[in-house]
Amino acid sequence: MIQLTIDKELIDRCRARDARAQESLYRLCYPVFMKICLRYANGYDDAANILQESFIKIFMKLHSYQESGDVVGWMKRIVVNSAIDHVRKEKTRSTVSMAKAIDVKEEEVAEENFVIDENQLLALIR
């Protein structure tokens, strides 16, 4: 596990909305937080969106951080909660009612439908 250490000066500069400090924080945390997002996402693009949303929340709420605990843990909690929210949204979008499903007879199912390409296989594995 990669250990992140973030100094108080960087956090203070981020609170002051210093764009360079925010970029530094983003680059520092990106590898660790992206791994978290990839665990919850269906692919790299979804993970990148989750991470983007997470950092927006982090920068918007950084003023409310009380410094009573580890800032990295606080930020990880935001990333995980954003990922869980994303999964919940995707779950409600992908739900299909049986009434809307099309009935297909077994004879009508072509053998070609069972052949998948490499990208589809990787998506199933994820």
Image (cartoon, rainbow, N blue to C red):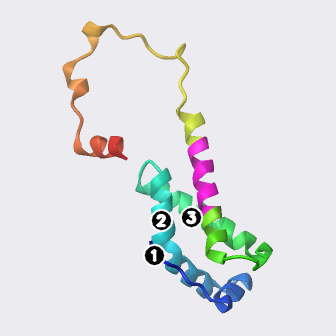
Name the N-terminal-most of marks 1 and 3: 1
- Label 2, secondary structure: give it: helix
The residue singled out by tag 3 in the image is 52
Task: Determine the main secondary structure of the stretch shown in magenta.
Answer: helix
| Label annotation for residue 34 | 2
The residue that appears at 37% across and 47% down in the rendered structure is 126
| Label annotation for residue 54 | none
Q: Are marks 3 and 2 in contact (CB under 8 Å)?
A: no
Please rate how many residues cluster around mark 3, counting C-alpha atoms within 10 Å: few if below 14, some from 14 to 19, many from 20: some
Q: Is residue 7 magenta?
A: no
Q: Are marks 1 and 3 in contact (CB under 8 Å)?
A: no
Name the N-terminal-most of marks 3 and 2: 2
Q: How many numbered discs, if any?
A: 3
The residue that appears at 54% across and 13% down in the rendered structure is 99
Please rate how many residues cluster around mark 1, counting C-alpha atoms within 10 Å: few if below 14, some from 14 to 19, many from 20: few
Task: Specify the amino acid type for callout 1.
Answer: Ile
Q: Looking at the picture, does residue 79 appear above or below residue 126?
A: below
Tell me: 60 left or right of 51. right
Residue 17, quarter of picture: bottom right
Q: Is residue 81 magenta?
A: yes
The residue that appears at 50% across and 61% down in the rendered structure is 36
The residue singled out by tag 1 in the image is 2
Residue 48: % across, % down? 49, 61
Residue 116: % across, % down? 24, 35
Q: CA distance from mark 2 to mark 1?
A: 12 Å
Q: Looking at the picture, does residue 23 appear above or below residue 80?
A: below
Q: CA distance from mark 1 to mark 3?
A: 20 Å
- Label 1, secondary structure: give it: loop
**Which residues fall within the magenta stretch?**
78-88
Residue 65: % across, % down? 76, 74
Tell me: 74 left or right of 121. right
**Which marked residue is nearer to the observer: mark 1 or mark 3?**
1
